[in-house]
Image (tube, rainbow, N blue to C red):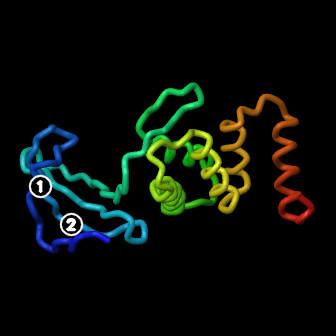
Amino acid sequence: MFAAVRDRPRKDSLMRCPFCNHDDTQVKDSRPSEEGASIRRRRSCSQCGQRFSTVERVQLRELIVVKADGRRAPFDREKLLRSVRIALRKRPVSEDRVEQIVSGIARRLEASGEGEIPTHLIGELAMEALHTVDAVGYVRFASVYRDFRETKDFSAIVTSMTDRKTGSD
C-alpha cells in the first residue's frame, strides 16, 4: 500500500517543526499503523531538538462536503474524529478503535466515487458504525446529529434499537 519505509533516518524539509517552525526536521522512525492504513513517523527538529509524531494517510480523492444550506467545504477528517470521540467519551472503546471507525468512514466516502458528499451521508455512516460498536455512543451521536429536543426522542431511538435487536422491526 505504501512505498517501502526506510530504516535509516532521513531529512524531510517539507515538514515544519510545530515548536519553533523550523523547516529542517528529520524522520527518526517510521512504522505502519491502523492496520497498514497509515504510517506514523517519529520526527526530530534539528534547530530546537524537540521530537514530535506525524501520521500519513492514503487519500484517494479530495472530498467536498455539501451542507444542508448548500454551502460546500472540504471534508474534515478531524471534525468527524472529534464527534466520534465525544460520542464515545468515557466508554470502553479504545482510541485505536475510534481511529478505525473514522478511517473506515473516510475510505467508504472516498470509494463512493463521488466528489461531493452530503452531510447527512457522513452522519448516517457514523451512526451505522457506532451502532455496531457501542449503543451508548450511538445514542449520544444520534442525539446531536438528529437534534433531539425532548426525552421522547431518546425513547424512540432506544425502542428502535431494542426492536432491531429482537428482530421485530
Is residue 98 visible in this depiction of the protein?
A: no
Label 1 amino acid? Asp
- Taking the spot 69% from the left edge, 50% from the top edge, the residue there is 138
Q: Is residue 159 toward the left or the right of residue 122 in the image?
A: right
Q: Quadrant of residue 75?
A: top left
- Taking the spot 50% from the left edge, 53% from the top edge, the residue there is 109
Q: Nearer the viewer, mark 1 or mark 2?
A: 1
Task: Work out which quarter of the rendered image holds the N terminus and state it.
Answer: bottom left
- Element class at badge 1: strand
- Taking the spot 16% from the left edge, 72% from the top edge, the residue there is 6
Counting residues from the start of the chain, the first of labels 1 and 2 encountered is 1
The residue that disc 2 covers is 29
Residue 32 position, x and y percent, is 32, 69
Numbered label attached to residue 12: 1
Q: Is residue 65 toward the left or the right of residue 29 in the image?
A: right
Label 2 amino acid? Asp
Judge by depth and name the residue closer to the eye, 69 or 144. Answer: 69
Question: Can you say whether 161 is above or below 76 in the image?
Answer: below
Question: Can you say whether 163 is above or below 140 in the image?
Answer: below
Give the crowd class for mark 2: few <14, some 14-19, many >=20 residues within 10 Å: some
- Element class at badge 2: strand
Task: Work out which quarter of the rendered image holds the C terminus and state it.
Answer: bottom right
Is residue 33 visible in this depiction of the protein?
A: yes
Give the crowd class for mark 1: few <14, some 14-19, many >=20 residues within 10 Å: few
Residue 120 position, x and y percent, is 62, 41
Question: Can you say whether 13 is above or below 18 in the image?
Answer: below
Q: CA distance from mark 1 to mark 2?
A: 12 Å
